Amino acid sequence: MTTPLIEIKNLHANIDGQEILRGLDLTINPGEVHSIMGPNGSGKSTLAQVLAGRDAFEVTEGEIIYEGKDLLDMDPDERACEGVFLAFQYPVEIPGVRTTQFLKAAINAVRKHRGEDEIDALDAVKLFREKMKLVDMDESLLKRAVNEGFSGGEKKRHEIFQMAVLEPKLCILDETDSGLDIDALRIVADGVNAMRSKDRSFLLITHYQRLLDYIVPDFVHVLVNGRIVQSGDKGLALELEKKGYSWVEKEPAAATA
Amino acid sequence: MTTATEQTINEFTGKGYKHGFVTEIESDSLPPGLNEDVIRFISEKKKEPDWMLEWRLKAYRDWLEMEMPDWQNVNFHPIDFQKIIYYSAPKKKPQLDSLDEVDPELLRTYEKLGIPLEEQKMLTGVAVDAVFDSVSVATTFKEKLAEAGVIFCPMSEALQKHPDLVKKYIGSVVPTNDNYFAALNSAVFSDGSFVYIPKGVTCPMELSTYFRINAMNTGQFERTLIIAAEGASVSYLEGCTAPMRDENQLHAAVVELVALDDAHIKYSTIQNWYPGDENGKGGIYNFVTKRGDCRGDRSHISWTQVETGSAVTWKYPSCVLKGDDSIGEFYSVALTNNRQQADTGTKMIHIGKNTRSYIVSKGISAGFSDNTYRGQVKVLKNASNARNYTQCDSLLMGDKCGAHTFPYIEVGNSTSQVEHEATTSKIGEDQIFYCTQRGISEEDAVSLIVNGFCKEVLKELPMEFAVEADKLLAISLEGSVG
Amino acid sequence: MIRLSDEAALQLTLNGTATEWLRAICEQGAAKFAELGLPSRRHEEWRLTSIKQIAETDFSFSDELPALSPKDVARFDIPGMAASRLVFINGRYAPDHSSLQSLPAGVTVLPLMEAVSSHGDLVQQHLAKHADMTDEAFTALNTAMLGDGVFVHVPDGMTVEQPIHVVNITTCAGEPLMTNPRNLIVAGDKAKVTVIEDYVCPDDDVYFTNAVTEVVVGKEANVTHYLLERESRKAFNIATLNIHQSESSNFTSHSVMLGGASVRNNIVPVLDGEHCFSTLNGLYLTSDKQHVDNHMRVFHNMPNCDSRQYYRGVLDDKSTAVFSGRIIVARDAQKTDAVQSNANLLLTDTARANTHPQLEIYADDVKCTHGATIGELDDNAIFYLRARGISEAAARGMLIHAFAAESLERMDIEPIVELLEAELYKRLPEGKMVQATL
C-alpha cells in the first residue's frame, strides 16, 4: 500500500463565523490527479485556501496530514517550501515587485528550506526561459511587476509557469480554467500534463468539466455544501455536465467510489 | 469654447431663482436684537421646561465668549447679530389639529414651492413637517406614524410631550459650545423637527421637513434631532427655500443624528435657499452644523446633499463612527453660480473597529463663484481595520470661478486603509459637440453632462426627490457654462 | 547664543557685512522675522508640526571652522559619483575639503559669501528675489542671519555635466548649533545643471539647520536638485526650496528624508512661463519618534505647464509624517496638467500619517488630479508571496522595498540610488535576502 501524499479528515472550516466546510474527507496518493467539482458556494475555493494556509479561514475540526506531518500546524510559506502549491483563482498584483525578483525569492526560499545553496543568477535565467516555453509565456512579463497589468490569460499562465519553476509535490489549481479561451486553456493544460509524474499529485478545482477534457483526472469528486457527496471517475464529470448540479444535490452521498 | 456655447451657457445659468416670492402673511415678530431677554421670551413662548431655558442661556453665554471662525474659504459681509430678528411666527397660528386649519395663504406658498401638503397627504406617502420662518406650521401623517410608534413632530412640541427624550439626546452630538454658530443656534433656536424611531421599527414612510424663510431680517435657527433606537431605520429629507431679498439673511441650523446598535439613518438635503442675485446682492448665509453619531455597533448614517442655493454655504455633515462595524457615508453635489460661495464637505471620525466611510463629492462652479470641498478623515489609534474611500470631483464652467479641494487625512492606525482621489475638469467641448451633433440643444447637453457628472450622488436620493434635484440643478445652472 | 522662544530673539543681531545691499537684505529679513514671530500650532501651515523644541533650545553660532580629517569628510562621499564638491562645516566653507575641478569655463561655482564680493552684480540680481517671506518666519530668519552656502551660475546654453555636491556637515558635541545655509542657483537660458544638497552629521549632536535655496531656471533650462537629509537623529532641519521657472524650463527635485528628529521640507516652484515642467519626487523613511513634514506649494501662473508631485513614506515605530501639497492654478493658467500623489505605508500601530493633498483652481480648462493613500502592507500580497514559500518577514521586506523603490526609480544619478538602496536594505526586514533577489 502506498503512503498517501495528503489525507484530509473530517475538515470543518469557518469564515466570519459561517461554516463553509462541513466534514470533508479526501485522500490523494502520489501521482494521482483528483478533480473537485461543485456548484458556486459549495466550498471549493475555501478548500484551496485552507490547504494553502489562508488565516481568514478558521479550521474548527478535523485534520490534514501531509507526508505524515500536520499541515495545519505549518505557516503558509512553510507549506509552500514543503511542496504545496496553489495556483490562485485570482492571482494578486504586486506593484513594484518584479516577476524575476519574486521568482528568485521563492526559489531561494524553497532551496534554503531543503538545505540547498541559492540559485546562481545565470541558472535562474536559464530555468525561467526553459519553463516559460512550457506555457508559451512572453519573456517580457518577467521584467514587469508581479501580475500587474497582466491579462486574465497571462495571469493564469503565469501561475502554471511558477508551478513549473518551483516543482511542487501537490499542485492545487483553483479554477485555473475560468476566464480562459480555448487556446489558452489548451496551453495551460499542456503545461500541467507535461508536469504529471508519479511523484506529483494534482487537485483540480473547477466548476466546468471542460478543463477535464484536457487534463484527464483519475478521480472526480463532487462537493456540495462543504462535503464530498459523490466520487467517481471521469464519467462522473460528464454526467454532471449533462444533468447539472441539482442532480447530486438531490441525491446526497448515494455512491462513493 | 465657442462663443455660441458661451452664450448658451450664460443664458442657461441666468434664468433666476423661482422660489423668490414673498408671502403676505401677518407675522408675530420680536424686534431685532439679541440678549438674554430674547432667549427667555423664545423659551417662554414655547412653554419650555426650565432646564431648557438654562441650557439656552448657557449656550448664549458661551457664544458671547466665542469668535466668529475665519478659516473657511469664503468672504462675506460681517454679520450684525443685533439686527437680526430671532423670532418670527405666522400670526394666525394657534394649535393646529389638521391641515384644514392652516392659513390658506401658507398652503398656497407650499404649493408654489412644489410641496402640496394636502395632496401629499393622500398621494405620496411622505410625512411632511413644514417650518415657516422659525415655526413649524404643519405636520402630516401624524396618526399613521404614531401607530408605528414613530414620533415625528416639531421640536417645540417634543419639548413638551417628550421632554425626557429631548433632554437625553439634545446637545449630545453637537455640544452647545461646539462652534460659534452651534452655540448661537442652541441659544435661540425656535423650532425644527424631532424624530424618534423606536427599537426595531422601520419608519413606514419617508419623513420630510420643508424650511422657508419668509419675513424680512429674520434669521432661521432650526434644530433637528433624529434618534434611531436599536435596529431602527429611517429616511429623512429636508428642503429649503427663501424669498428674494436684497439683504443677507442668516440660517444657522443644527442637526443631530443618533444611531444606536444596528440602526440606519439616511438624511437627505435639497438646499435651495435664495443665492442672491447675479451681482451677489442678497442671499442666505447658510452656516449649518450637522453631525451624526454612529453610537451603536453596526450603525449606519448616510448624508446626501444637493446644495444649489445660498450666497455663502459653510457646512460639513459629519459622522462620528464610535460603534464597531459602523458605517458613515457622505454624498454631495454642490453647485455654485454667479457670486455664490460654498465651503462644504464632511468629517469622518473613525473611533470604533472595522468602521467604514465613503465620501463622494461633486462640485460644480460657474460664473464668479467659488466652490470648496473641505473634508477630514481621521482614524484614531484604536480604530483597527478602518477603511475610507474619498472621491472628489470638480467641474468648472467658465474661467472666472474657482474649484478647491482641501482634504485633511489623519491616520494613526496601521491596519487602516484610506484613499483619496480627486479630479478637476471642465465640460469638454467635444462632449457638447457630440451631443449637439445628435440633435440635442447645447443647453440640454450641458444639463445632461452635469447630470451625468452628479449621477453617483443623485442616485442616493429618495426617488420622490431625485426628480426635484434634477430640475433644480438645471435651473441653478442656467446661464453658466464656459 | 539665541533662544527663539524669547521675545528678545525677535530682534536679531545681524552678521557684520561690509556690503551695503546685502546688509539691506538681511535687515529686511530681520524686520520680517520680528513682525511674524515664530509660527504656533494655531498657524494653519504649522498645525501638525511643533517647533517647540526648536524654539526652546539655546543655540549658539559658530565662528570657526572645525578641523576635520579628510577621512572624517570622506565618509559622506557618495561612492562612485564624480562630482564637484563644496564642503561646509558648521556653516563655514572648508576649501581644503572641497574640489571644484572640471567645471566648464564661464560656469561659476563658489561659496556665496565669496561670490558676494567677486560676482556682486549677479548675486544681487537674484538673491532674496525668490525666497518668499510673506508668511515664512524661517525664511525671514535665514535671510536675516544669511549664512554661507553655494552660489552656482551657469550661463546661457552651457551644460555642467558633473553634479555639484554640496556637503553640509554639522559637528557640535555638547553645544547646540544653529546654521542658516543660503544657496543660490542660477541657470541661464538653455543651461543645464544638477545640484545636490546634502546634510550630514558624524555623531548624534543636537543642532538646527535652517536652509534656504533659491533656484532660478531660465528659458528652456534644465535644473535638477537633490536634497539628501541625513542629519543626526537629534537634529532639527528646515529646508526651503524656492524655484522660479521661465518658459519651457524643466525643474526636477528629489528629496530624501532619512535623519533628523524633526524635519520640515518646503518646496515652492513658481511656474512663471508657458510650457514649464516641474517634478517633485520625495521619499521619507522614518522610525523611532522622528517627525517629517513635507510642504509643497506649486504655483501654476501660466498656461500649458505640467507639474508632478510624487511623495512616498514608510513610517515605522512611533514616527509621524505630514504631507501638505497644494496646486494653485491661476485664473489664466489654462491647459494646466498637474498631478499630486502621496502614499504612506504605516508599519506599526503607533506611527501616524497626515496628508493634505489640496487643489486651488481658478482656471477651467485644466487637468488636475490628486490622490493620497495611507495604509498597511497588502495582506493578499503577503499571502501570495508566502504561498510561494517566502517567509513573512521577507515578504514584508520585499513589499516595503517595492513601495520605496518607486521613488528611487525616478532618480537619475545611479550612485545616489545605490547609496539610498543600501540605506533601505539596512532598514528592511530580511533586507539582505531582498537585496539578493534583485
Image (tube, coloured by chain):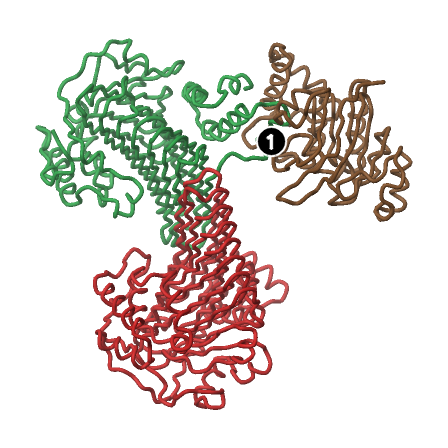
Chain colours: A brown, B red, C green
Horizontal relation, residue B300 to residue A37: left or right: left
The residue shown at (14%, 26%) is: C60
Left or right of C430, for residue B406: left
Foreground residue, A70 or B141?
Answer: A70
Q: Is residue A52 left or right of residue C159?
A: right
**Picture quadrant where residue B226 is located:** bottom left
Dot 1 falls on which chain?
C
Q: Is residue C341 visible?
A: yes
On the image, the x and y values in percent for residue A41 come to 73, 45
Q: Position of residue B337 (x, y in %)?
A: 41, 66
Residue C359, above or below C93: below
Q: Quadrant of residue B56?
A: bottom left
| Residue C180 place in picture, x, y as percent | 20, 29
Q: Is residue B400 visible?
A: no
Mark 1 residue element: helix
Circle 1 residues within 10 Å: few <14, some 14–19, many ≥20: many
Between B286 and A238, the residue placed more toward the observer is: A238
Compared to residue A48, the image places residue B454 above or below, namely: below
Which amino acid, mark 1? Phe
Instruction: Give the residue pinned by disc 1.
Output: C383
Q: Position of residue C177 (x, y in %)?
A: 18, 25
Q: How many marks?
A: 1
For the C terminus of chain B, the quadrant is bottom left
